[in-house]
Amino acid sequence: MRFLYLLLFVLLFNCYNTERNCTDFKTGKFYSEVTINGEIFRSEFIRTENLQIETYNKQIDSSKLRWINDCEVIFKTINPKNMAEQKDIHLKILTTTNNSYTFEYSYVGETKKQKGIAYKVK
């Protein structure tokens, strides 16, 4: 009997899928929040299929986008000002809601990832 309960428990939790309607977030106007060492960093951005224009601390950065699939994208800074900006960034959408998505990102090839949440404004 215990085995039956255990089997039922395992089957129920293995069938749980997180919702990911990534195509809803390929274009639009957004703001994002990332917490690093307890500090919240907020930026605003406008995204088209191939371009993202981001404002952070009154600085504007533009990146070309290359979508790997509906939920993963590579950002390449258009006019990098230093070596760090020359590195491409890989972003993966982990979960979505009606107006937001949770994501993780890192420099391409690096294993250390940061997480954040983005909210769709329009």
Image: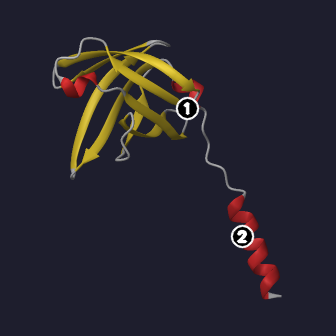
Residue 5: x, y in percent? 77, 80
- Per the image, the residue denoted by label 2 is 10
Q: Which of pointers 1 and 2 lies earlier in the amino acid sequence? A: 2
User: What amino acid is found at the position of numbered circle 2 in the picture?
Assistant: Val
Give the farthest residue toward the front: 109
Quadrant in the picture for residue 118:
top left
Residue 38: x, y in percent? 21, 52
Residue 20: x, y in percent? 60, 38
Residues packed near mark 2 inside 10 Å, few (<14), some (14 to 19) or many (20 plus)? few
Work out whether 24 lies above or below 38: above
- Per the image, the residue denoted by label 1 is 71
User: What amino acid is found at the position of numbered circle 1 in the picture?
Assistant: Cys
Which quadrant is home to the C terminus? top left
Give the farthest residue toward the bottom: 1
Q: Residue at x 38, y 46 (%)?
A: 111
Which quadrant is home to the N terminus? bottom right
Q: CA distance from mark 1 to mark 2?
A: 27 Å
Q: Nearer the viewer, residue 98 or 107?
A: 107
Residue 18: x, y in percent? 61, 48
Q: Residue at x 44, y 17 (%)?
A: 65
Work out whether 110 lies above or below 82: below
| Marking on residue 24 | none
Under tag 2, what secondary structure? helix
Q: Residue at x 44, y 25 (%)?
A: 74
* Label tally: 2
Residues packed near mark 1 inside 10 Å, few (<14), some (14 to 19) or many (20 plus)? some
Q: Nearer the viewer, residue 25 or 92?
A: 92
Q: Nearer the viewer, residue 69 or 12?
A: 69
Under tag 1, what secondary structure? loop
Query: Would residue 39 appear left or right of 106 to someone viewing this image?
Result: left
Work out whether 38 lies above or below 91: below
Quadrant in the picture for residue 10:
bottom right
